[in-house]
Image: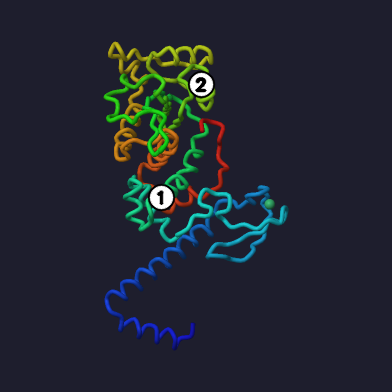
């Protein structure tokens, strides 16, 4: 744009009424934000690979919609930085950072929609796309003293428009009131370095624990209460076991054997989840991952980090859980 045209534009802005000025300001902020988000995505330091053949040999292949495009030397396909990631084909990039902030604040779908000026269906879609990668980012191993405890959620079909049963008027009073077939078992392991591992179990059994606890190292001391499932698992797999007889009021043994950290984690998670007024079981793993991610950063994660973690391709360890 020529200098004289910019001067003319600035002059015309001075004559705008408040309503028009406000519209113009919104538009500039939106564009600024799109540019900033695109800058962040284009300059992510993560190694770039072809989403089709995983080759690292790429050409730069122009820019479209502010995003750098690449061409693969191996398979000759073209793509941009978002191709093959959970954020592919989502619109309104300019509002993604605000949405990432809503994730940090733990806002409900409707509140996040209102804050970002998008429809609630968009907010719902964004939430689960933004959280998709969180499930894959888990610690590779837990070591030292590891506390383990299960947590039961009631199976929920929230959002399902074709219920096969009559809708319940009220939730269950306590876990004991949940019928066994409606129980969803989740497992939480936390070592003393605050690394946490969570997952949804198909069945609460020693065999299931064996595959799900494969990330604990051999020298681990596993602390749990004295449920038969843990006793059987530790015996069959020669894992050192710190057993607490909680029904007899035993909460600490030899100063180090306790499960206080994992219990606090579970309690904080449950308190945090109250705001969502129940979550559908099919999305439960996303909420567990969401909370774990916030905890990993001590709830001081930035919206830029949330965005970059959301867009990184699914190249993380998927051996454990879902
Ligand atoms: Zn390729």
Rounded to the nearest angstrom, the CA distance separating label 2 from label 1 is: 36 Å
Q: Nearer the viewer, residue 201 or 144?
A: 201
Q: At x 29% / y 40%, what residue is drawn?
A: 275
Q: At x 50% / y 24%, what residue is drawn?
A: 213
The x and y percentages for residue 300 are: 36, 46
Any part of residue 49 in sight: yes
Q: Which residue is mark 1?
A: 121
Q: At x 33% / y 35%, what residue is drawn?
A: 278
Instruction: Say which element carries label 1.
Output: helix
Q: Is residue 194 above or below residue 221?
A: below
The x and y percentages for residue 90 are: 49, 55
Q: Which residue is mark 2?
A: 208
Q: Nearer the viewer, residue 67 or 244?
A: 67
Instruction: Say which element carries label 2.
Output: helix
Nearest to viewer (mark 2 / mark 1) = 1
The x and y percentages for residue 14 are: 31, 83
| Mark 2 residue crowding within 10 angstroms, few (<14) / some (14–19) / many (20+) | some
């Amino acid at each position: 744009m020529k200098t004289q045209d910019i001067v003319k534009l600035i002059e015309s802005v001075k004559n705008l009424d408040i309503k028009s000025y406000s519209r113009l300001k919104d538009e500039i902020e939106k564009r600024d934000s799109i540019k900033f988000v695109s800058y962040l995505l284009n300059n992510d330091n993560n190694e770039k690979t072809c989403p089709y053949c995983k080759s690292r040999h790429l050409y730069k292949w122009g820019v479209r919609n502010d995003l750098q495009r690449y061409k693969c030397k191996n398979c000759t396909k073209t793509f941009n930085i978002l191709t093959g990631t959970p954020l592919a084909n989502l619109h309104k990039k300019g509002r993604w950072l605000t949405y990432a902030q809503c994730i940090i604040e733990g806002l409900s779908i409707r509140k996040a929609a209102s804050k970002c000026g998008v429809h609630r269906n968009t907010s719902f879609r964004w939430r689960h796309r933004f959280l998709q990668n969180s499930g894959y980012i888990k610690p590779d191993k837990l070591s030292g003293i590891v506390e383990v405890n299960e947590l039961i959620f009631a199976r929920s079909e929230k959002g399902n428009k074709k219920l096969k049963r009559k809708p319940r008027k009220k939730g269950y009073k306590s876990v004991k009131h949940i019928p066994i077939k409606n129980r969803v078992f989740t497992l939480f392991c936390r070592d003393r370095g605050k690394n946490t591992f969570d997952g949804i179990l198909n069945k609460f059994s020693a065999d299931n624990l064996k595959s799900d606890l494969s990330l604990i190292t051999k020298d681990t001391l596993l602390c749990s209460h004295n449920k038969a499932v843990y006793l059987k698992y530790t015996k069959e797999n020669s894992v050192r076991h710190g057993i607490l007889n909680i029904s007899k009021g035993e909460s600490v043994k030899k100063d180090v054997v306790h499960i206080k950290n994992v219990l606090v984690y579970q309690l904080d998670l449950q308190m945090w989840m109250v705001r969502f007024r129940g979550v559908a079981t099919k999305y439960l793993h996303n909420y567990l991952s969401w909370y774990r991610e916030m905890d990993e950063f001590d709830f001081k994660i930035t919206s830029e980090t949330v965005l970059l973690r959301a867009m990184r391709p699914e190249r993380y360890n998927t051996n454990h859980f879902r």
